[in-house]
Image: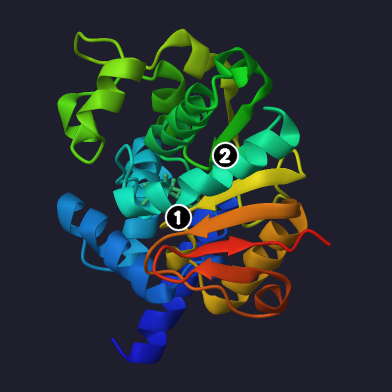
Amino acid sequence: MTSEQDDRAFRALTQQITRARGLACDSYKDRCLRRRIAVRMRARGVHSFTDYGRLLDQDAREYDLLLDALTINVTKFFRNLETWRALAPRLAQRWTARRGEVRAGSAGCASGEEPYTVAVALAETARRLGQEGLLGRARVDATDIDRTSLERTRAAEYGEAAFTEMPAELVRRYFTAELPRRPLPALQRIVRVAKHDLTSESPPAPPYDLVVCRNVVIYFDRPMQERLFSLFADALAPGGVLVLGKVETLFGPARERLVLEEPRERIYRRPAS
Ligand SMILES: C[S@@+](CC[C@H](N)C(=O)[O-])C[C@H]1O[C@@H](n2cnc3c(N)ncnc32)[C@H](O)[C@@H]1O
């Protein structure tokens, strides 16, 4: 097969996936898509994109397995602990200014470890300020495109492996002791879980004091990344903070609108005025 035929067959397959499941494949990097589709093709013993497309038509369950493979959902509580440490004084500042009415979003939240990390960080802020009673005023929107991930976020049950980066003291303070561990009800009450496709929908409830979108845009091509960065800048309240993943960098028009406050931790702020 020539590389042109291969490209055509690949395009036809990604269009089929978009039609069937609404995933905007053309916003993801080709390299990423190809690698992950190849994993599924190998698993099913299929050797061409065309044959894999036929298989998808015959076996709807394969779509679920493929979408799981495409929307990789590796995550942990307090992933990159230093980032959360750098965020803590900013949350405290925001908390004080907003008297606890902090709106946060975790976009691409996978199985919920990230939004619950935000909830713990907010609870810690409230505790340090002696304002635990105000925690109920905060809200964390946990969103993802992947249904299975959202079900896990709603179930909020976690094995030991999810906690390897989280300080033990915080695990004891905010999670049940027995496994699977669950976040305390006060945290569960402030996390709202909703399906949301970053490539086609605006952030659910702006303005946000904090938007955390880490290790998600890396799978998108540059035009989509640039669009999302502008959407995040729009969604932030003046003075609000954006956190990207450690290997992700803001560029495009949003770069002019947001100030890079912590280069290593990819923490940006929308100026207050
Ligand atoms: C590697 S995980 C990142 C989890 C978490 N943010 C972290 O850094 O630990 C990537 C997540 O992005 C989600 N995702 C991929 N495409 C998406 C889209 N178009 N809209 C919303 N979420 C998406 C995946 O389903 C997956 O849960």
| SS for dot 2 | helix
Does mark 1's beta carbon lie closer than 8 Å to ligand 1?
Answer: yes
Q: CA distance from mark 1 to mark 2?
A: 21 Å
Mark carried by residue 214: 1
As rendered, which of 138 and 24 lies closer to the eye? Answer: 138
- Residue positioned 64% across, 70% down in the render: 259
Evaluate whether residue 211 shows in this view. Answer: yes
- Camera-nearest residue between 244 and 10: 244
- The part of the image, by quadrant, that contains residue 52 is bottom left
Q: Position of residue 21 (x, y in %)?
A: 54, 46
Q: Is residue 242 above or below residue 132?
A: below
Q: Residue at x 40, y 47 (%)?
A: 84
Quadrant position of residue 193: top right
Quadrant (top left/top right/bottom left/bottom right) for the N terminus:
bottom left
Q: Which residue is mark 2?
A: 92
The location of residue 81, given as percent across then percent down, is 31, 48
Q: Determine the secondary structure under disc 1.
A: loop
Q: Amino acid at mark 1?
A: Arg
